[in-house]
């Protein structure tokens, strides 16, 4: 798939604020600093696409981007804001869970995981919650240029082993680098196939 156009649509503060749309949606989420903005910019080849999402006040919102006037890329707030105060944190979790559980045109969630680290509890917990809730997801291991392939594979294997508790079968896995653009074609092909299904 070629990305011809990628334009910011709107930021939603809550589920009610999400745009009315029949277009298929693909959502991206991960811990803050996992490389989500870089990945979205790399995928769309728009240097500043995700700048919109990272503007002050927008990081806790759901940001919608229209791609090729055909599908919607949804940038979800990063999870694991350990520092956020109780009320803020709850509110943020509410936006994300409402969207993931209630959005009828959501096709797939891309869960971003930093390929440099062994499995982190928060990533496993979130992935486990998606699986239990029946939300379709795939795993995207980011920053692959930063480690040796063997080390990345070892982290992925550990993640898969720990997922066995809550996920039957093999999760779909992508290994990406926003620096080298490795994995870009596979991700876009996956989206293309989902759109045709
Ligand atoms: P976000 O908080 O998840 O949106 O993360 P960012 O995209 O802002 O990335 C966090 C940091 O990791 C930044 O310093 C990026 O330059 C760096 N980064 C992100 N993706 C990659 C990657 O694929 N390769 C390398 N080498 N650095 C990356």
Image: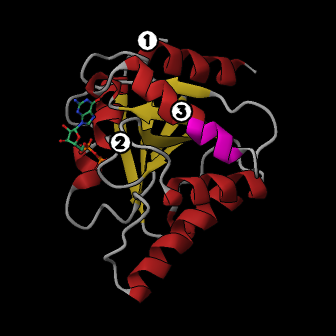
- Element at badge 1? loop
The disc label shown at residue 156, or none: 3
Q: Gap in Å between the C-alphas at discs 2 and 1?
A: 20 Å
Span of residues in magenta? 158-163
Q: Is residue 51 above or below residue 14?
A: above
Of residues 20 and 196, which is closer to you in this image? Answer: 196
Percent of width and height locating residue 101: 69, 60
Percent x, y of residue 132? 77, 57
Viewer-side label of 1, 3:
3
Left or right placement of residue 23 versus residue 74 in this view: right
Between discs 2 and 1, the one toward the N terminus: 1
- Residue picked out by circle 1: 2
Q: Is mark 1 within 8 Å of ligand 1?
A: no
- Is the CB of mark 2 within 8 Å of ligand 1? yes
In the foreground, 122 or 5: 122
Q: How is the image coloured?
A: secondary structure
Residue at (58%, 28%) from the top-left corner?
Answer: 173
Q: Residue furthest right?
A: 168
């Amino acid at each position: 798939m070629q990305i011809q156009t990628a334009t910011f649509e709107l930021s939603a503060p809550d589920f009610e604020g999400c745009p009315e749309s029949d277009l298929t949606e693909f959502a991206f989420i991960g811990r803050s600093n996992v490389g989500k903005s870089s990945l979205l910019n790399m995928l769309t080849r728009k240097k500043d696409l995700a700048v919109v999402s990272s503007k002050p006040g927008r990081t806790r919102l759901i940001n919608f981007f229209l791609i090729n006037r055909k599908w919607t890329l949804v940038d979800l707030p990063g999870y694991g804001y350990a520092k956020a105060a109780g009320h803020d944190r709850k509110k943020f979790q509410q936006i994300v869970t409402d969207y993931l559980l209630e959005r009828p045109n959501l096709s797939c969630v891309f869960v971003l995981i930093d390929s440099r680290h062994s499995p982190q509890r928060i990533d496993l917990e979130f992935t486990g919650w998606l699986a239990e809730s029946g939300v379709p997801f795939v795993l995207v291991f980011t920053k692959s240029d930063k480690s040796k392939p063997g080390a990345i594979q070892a982290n992925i294997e550990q993640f898969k082993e720990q997922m066995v508790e809550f996920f039957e079968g093999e999760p779909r896995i992508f290994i990406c680098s926003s620096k080298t653009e490795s994995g870009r074609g596979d991700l876009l092909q996956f989206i293309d196939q989902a759109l045709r299904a």
